[in-house]
Image: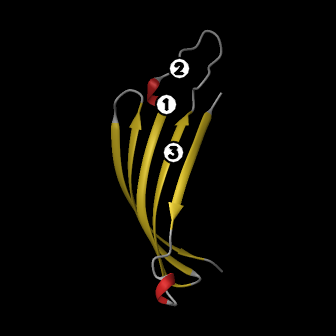
Amino acid sequence: QMTGYYVQAGYDVLRPLGSAHRLVPFARFEAVNTQAEVPDGYTSSDANDLKIITGGLNYFPVSEVVVKADYSLVMDGGDNETKTINAALGYMF
């Protein structure tokens, strides 16, 4: 059995200025355990019990285009940590 949840918040900081552009800083917390319960005869691994903290920015120069960047810290139940930086460009058509 797998369990998990996440909470995310972001706000367009340019909206109060009346800008046509949007800049949305965000933060997210996730908890995921892909082996919350395992069948009899199997042993779950703490490495599959993850806590993930992510912070980043989404910039919309026009409504159809987004430039994204974020930083994540992934911690597992086995006391291992992984840090990642992601960047992306999105287009909605």
Q: Nearer the viewer, residue 16 or 62?
A: 16
Give left or right: position of 49 versus 81.
right
Q: Identify the image's colour scheme: rainbow, by chain, secondary structure or one colour.
A: secondary structure
The reply to whether dot 3 and dot 2 touch (C-beta < 8 Å) is no
Instruction: Report how far apart the C-alphas of labels 3 and 1 lie in the structure.
Output: 13 Å
Q: Quadrant of residue 78?
A: top left
Mark 3 or 1: the one toward you: 3
Classify 46 as above or below 55. above
Q: Secondary structure at mark 2?
A: loop
Residue at figure coordinates x 45%, y 25% from the top left: 46
The image's mark for residue 29 is none
Amino acid type at circle 1 is Asn
The amino acid type found where label 2 is placed reads Ser
Residue appearing at x 65%, y 16% in the figure: 39
Residue 30, numbered circle: 3
- In the picture, which quadrant includes the N terminus? top right
The residue carrying pointer 3 sits among few (fewer than 14), some (14 to 19) or many (20 or more) residues within 10 Å by Cα, namely some
* Residue behind mark 1: 48
Taking the spot 62% from the left edge, 22% from the top edge, the residue there is 37
Name the residue furthest top: 41
Q: Earlier in the sequence, mark 3 or mark 1?
A: 3
Could you say where residue 22 lies in the image, as x and y percent from the top left? 50, 81
Residue to which mark 2 is pinned: 44
Q: Quadrant of the C terminus?
A: bottom right
Q: Amino acid at mark 3?
A: Glu
Please state which of residues 21 and 17 is positioned toward the viewer in this rendering: 17
**Label 1 near label 3: C-beta < 8 Å?**
no
Is residue 15 shown to the viewer in this render?
Answer: yes
Q: Residue at x 49, y 31 (%)?
A: 49
How much space separates mark 2 and mark 1, taking CA atoms? 8 Å
